Amino acid sequence: MNQKTSTGSISREWQELLDFDRHHLWHPYTSMIDPLPVYGVESAEGVKIRLADGRELIDGMASWWSVIHGYSHPRLVRALQEQAGSLSHVMYGGLAHEPAVALGRKLVDLTPAGLEKVFFCDSGSVAVEVAMKMALQYCHARGKPEKHQFATVRSGYHGDTFHAMSVCDPVTGMHHIYSGVLPQYHFAPRPACSFFDEWDPEDISPLSELLAENHESLCALILEPIVQGAGGMRFYHPRYLSEARKLCDQFDVLLICDEIATGFGRSGQMFACDHSSISPDILCLGKALTGGMLSLAATLTSEAVARTISSAEPGVFMHGPTFMANPLACRVAGESIDLLLESDWQRLVATIQNKLEQGLKPCRDFDQVADVRCLGAIGVVELHKPVNMATIQQRFVEHGVWVRPFGTLVYLMPPYCIEAADLEYLCQAVVDVVAVEG
Ligand SMILES: *Cc1c(COP(=O)(O)O)cnc(C)c1O
């Protein structure tokens, strides 16, 4: 484990950096008046994050689902350096390049059947915006402009831009702050039947009723397949998704699957849709697409949707980011997919699931813990009460691990390359820290 726990203090230079940071730089979901402390990072390699004070932390977060091969992977670094030497960026309007074609080929091959047309964009939230615009333009092109609303389920998360926000859970997504601005869409209750339960046909009834009642005004249903991520880290039954697919066909509503968190093996299948053997009409990818090296996302759709969009006024899809299909990001994404396919990823992820189950099991005995659940390379300890971020973050760092809880959830989703001893250490840190929480 060779845990380096020297708590050397940080240099004057670092002190100044962190001081500027505190006064001028916004971090995700933070206050500018009284932000919690942040830790300076010097470098990261494999599953280790090296802090400014010399401490090394074992990473349990894969930087929010993205760093599946570990940090500074030599193959990804080399791909990026080589690409930077020949073509870092060029506008995508009217120009094409090999890294985008190579990546597009891989995505069309790898994703569920029928997804043939690829739109590259900058980030996950934008991929969701693009997906929603595709669904709207599809209905517009068919002469059904009245089908312009969206349906989803509660406890979802689809990103932070406006239309993505409109389909996030209304409570955890804080819709009240944006009332009057955010469109009001249709929410079914979240799926109740868990991945591990026996399927209960009643579980799909509310969604079925919602679609039956509103299909004339609905263009699409958007779901995170199987794993509801930032909206609650829940794993629902594969039958729910296959039933939702059937309902969408029955009621002439497109199915958008947001695999930004789950894509590329995280749930134990290459895509979470594969648990249900379904293909969505539109698929969003992001996060692990570049192995966590750069921001890149993609929205894929079927021949039929793309053709319909392109066959009627205005005859084009109305979106085109400045950094669309950035060659650096495409090249490193292609390399990351090669690395994944060359690895025994399915066995690695299954082994991580076993180890997470074993390692987190002691948490079940704590009164403060409501549930412990694991699927693929995702391990979740749900508490009854929200954690105290100020103290819990510090405790994890003192234990030599990087774990960042939110709300009532303490969770692990390490890089797939994590070794058994490091994973055991991570789980033990969670057990020790949760033991004294609340
Ligand atoms: C993270 C995430 C997004 C948003 O992606 P960003 O790159 O942060 O914009 C959308 N949907 C899901 C399911 C996500 O996990």
Image (tube, helix red, strand yellow):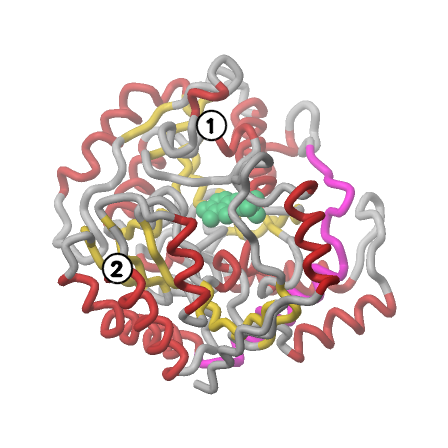
Count of numbered labels shown in the rendering = 2
Q: Secondary structure at mark 2?
A: loop
Residue drawn where x is 56% and y is 70% of the image? 49
Left or right, 403 with reference to 275: right
Residue drawn where x is 30% and y is 70% of the image? 356
Answer few, some or many: residues within 10 Å of disc 2's Cα (few below 14, many 20 plus, some between 14 and 19).
few
Image x and y of residue 278, in percent: 36, 52
Please tell me the numbered disc located at residue 436. Answer: 2
- Magenta span includes 329: yes
Image x and y of residue 103, in percent: 65, 62
Q: Is residue 136 above or below residue 411?
A: above
Q: Is residue 299 visible?
A: no
Q: Which residues are magenta?
A: 319-344
Image x and y of residue 374, in percent: 28, 62
How far is disc 1 from disc 2 in space, using C-alphas? 37 Å
Residue designated by label 1? 166
Left or right, 329 with reference to 252: right
Q: Main secondary structure of the magenta part?
A: helix
The amino acid on which the numbered mark 2 sits, given as a three-letter code, is Val
Q: Nearer the viewer, residue 254 or 367?
A: 367
Q: Nearer the viewer, residue 363 or 11?
A: 11
Task: Locate residue 433: give its quadrant.
Answer: bottom left
Please tell me the numbered disc located at residue 222. Answer: none
Do the numbered discs 1 and 2 sit on residues whose CB atoms are within 8 Å? no
- Magenta span includes 296: no
